[in-house]
Image (cartoon, rainbow, N blue to C red):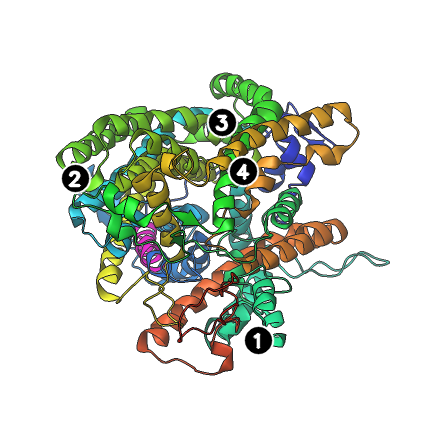
Amino acid sequence: MVQISEITDDDVERGPGAAIPGGGEDDGDDASSPIEQVRMTVPATDDPTLPVWTFRMWALGLLSCGLLSFLNQFFSYRTEPIIVTQITVQVASLPLGHFLARVLPTRKIRAPAVLGGGEWSLNPGPFNMKEHVLISIFANAGCAFGDGSAYAVMIVDIIRAFYRRSIPFFAAWLLITTTQVLGYGWAGLMRRYVVEPAHMWWPGTLVQVSLFRALHEKEDNNQQPAEGGGSPRKTSRAKFFLVALACSFLWYAVPGYLFPTLTSVSWVCWIFSKSVTAQQLGSGMRGLGLGAFTLDWTAVSSYLYSPLVSPFFVTANILAGFILFMRFPIFSSHLFTSAGTGYDINAIVDKSFEIDMDAYHRQGRINMSTFFALSYGLSFAAIAATITHVALFHGREIYRRFRASRKEAGDKPDVHTRLMKENYEDAPGWWFYSLLALSAGVSLLLCTVLKKEVQLPWWGLLFACAMAFVFTLPISIITATTNQTPGLNVLSEYVIGLILPGKPIANVCFKVYGYMSMSQAVSFLSDFKLGHYMKIPPKSMFLVQLVGTMVAGTVNLGVAYWLLGSVPNICQDALLPPDSPWTCPGDRVFFDASVIWGLVGPRRIFGALGNYGALNWFFLAGAVGPAIVYALHKAFPKQRWIRKINLPVLIGATASMPPATAVNYNSWLLIGIAFNFFVFRYRKKWWQRYNYILSAALDAGVAFMGVLLYFTLSMENRNVSWWGTAGEHCPLASCPTAKGVDLGSDSVCPLVL
């Protein structure tokens, strides 16, 4: 039976390196991994004769990468974005691979001497797991490693849709490609420290390993129960996956097309149809979301991803943070004047794409909704808390592991590293160094020759590269051991905003070259570890990741230019029809960030020249918080729950809001608690066998039906119109409550006297 690792709360908090009751980490030997979860999940065997460099792999890999790139960029502009992940390709490519293995000719063809000679075949044998892994890694590039589309495309989106300016396609392509490949260079530098060592175990990759084994390995489920009783026959994990996939696929037609109101069931609004206060409290999309829930898996997983994968202690911290900070029923990601009207950003941008100070003084200071402002304060606190928390709770461990990694990579590899070194030639280091040098060189040309388009000076690029280099290793170590990746995007925006105020595109470019190239490196390293566990030749991994990244970025950009030029008023929710899906929630937040940190600058918003200077105290509060928790932990070591208070997670719980709303959190928390507390505690064998498989099936089913619905119905404007397709029915939730505010005769909002 294939087992899924039981990553308990204590295991994640304690991390590898500590004694785990009933097993856990031990000294081991070169025949096993020192990590219990890895021993339970990853096979300690390899068959180096399996072909991986096959026509099937390249055909299905390129197809899946291009298709996922197209779909994820396309759906990223929707109000409830659908992210089609590599799990969808894992499912779809399996029967396609077996089909090609049946129909392709097996005749061998001799290659020309210039290509090395030898013989090859379109069909070298049965479709195998290693081909499947490489196809999945191809696809992972197409979904930006689970984030949907290439992050740098949002720069193009805000320039064209929000600032209403233009950027040449070639300059945009260079920007996207260099940021992606730059991250690949950082990953190459860090491989020996966070991929080869056994203690760098990357918990998230174990889910993928489990799914691959469930799809390829046969389980013996026909054994009769032992005499006198015994356990009943169990449904195979592959069969369970297919049944759950079919159910998810069929059900999504209801909230995705026939009954969209189920995306946010805000029943309080239905009962109190004429009360502004009640609708502000009950709306799941625009209010506090009291009692609101969803029957739509996309609303559950759109922003926080699957709740079935998150350990319970993380869910508990997010629940505490959500209850603590989500106390403001009205929030918006828009920017306002002091009178409460929308702030005309384009009016304060001059011809040089910089701030027009005279126009800025005429409109006045920028104002944000209470919750939007608070979300930035919480981001400040979360950044400071991350640094303090890691230093106090993991600092000694990270330093020890860094020293151990350097030693371990050289003289005491575990079974997986040993098999990789024995059976496969490593990708030369100069491949990565050359990519790093090439991408840095092209980026410098972009910042000098095309400086008007990117606004970032050459020294700003070098500063961004230095930031990425400094943070990639510690962030990778944290992710590899705790499955949590601290976010430093606000820090990068703040720093460059202080140095280069008034330049919005320079700000977002710095963020992409600094923070996002580091984030890309972490994602690349995660895929390297998956290939390490599945015994994929390193050279094949290198080429597949590189080609996939180039293809994905190009397709993302092509789709963006197509939609930005063909959908009227895309991303302009005030100009779109009420039921239009093209509201671009992620791009809206990205645009606001470029205004706050770049165009206006942190001094005019969070400094003495702005309205939100008090939010800087959140840095101090965030830095002190973990120290208090650490002191309490040391004072009361027997109270194990104290150590589970993770302030970076708790404070950053609402970091996705906006664009995420209350209904996204309500349902995510409910499902997470149900499965990772109650099911895990009282039905542990079921959880171990099926939990991750259920998560994969739900994601894949929604993705398949979402694509089918759009291209068969929505694209042809074949829509259903009735009460269940008219949104959540909370029209008064966004009404102002201040006295004397009237939005006009066409508004449903009453005038408050």
What span is colored magenta in the figure? Answer: 55-71
* Circle number at residue 274: 1
Q: Nearer the viewer, mark 4 or mark 1?
A: 1
The tag earlier along the polypeptide, 2 or 1, is: 1
Q: Nearer the viewer, mark 3 or mark 1?
A: 1
The image quarter in which residue 222 lies? bottom right
In the rendered image, which residue does mark 4 sit on? 484
Q: Nearer the viewer, mark 2 or mark 4?
A: 2
- Distance (Cα) linking label 2 and label 4: 37 Å
Q: Nearer the viewer, mark 4 or mark 3?
A: 4
Q: Describe the element under mark 3 as helix, strand or loop.
A: helix
Q: Position of residue 109 (x, y in %)?
A: 23, 49
In the rendered image, which residue does mark 2 sit on? 452
Q: Residues within 10 Å of mark 2 (few under 14, many from 20)?
A: some
Residue drawn at x 22%, y 30% is: 457
Amino acid on which disc 1 is placed: Lys
The tag earlier along the polypeptide, 3 or 1, is: 1
* Depicted 506 relative to depicted 95: above or below: above
The tag earlier along the polypeptide, 2 or 4, is: 2
- Residue 157 is left or right of residue 277, and the answer is left
The tag earlier along the polypeptide, 4 or 3, is: 3
Q: Position of residue 474 (x, y in %)?
A: 48, 26
Amino acid on which disc 2 is placed: Lys
Q: Is residue 56 shown in magenta?
A: yes
- Foreground residue among 631 and 258: 631
In the rendered image, which residue does mark 3 sit on? 418
Q: Describe the element under mark 2 as helix, strand or loop.
A: helix
Q: Describe the element under mark 4 as helix, strand or loop.
A: loop
Amino acid on which disc 3 is placed: Arg
The image quarter in which residue 27 lies? top right
Q: Position of residue 627 (x, y in %)?
A: 64, 25
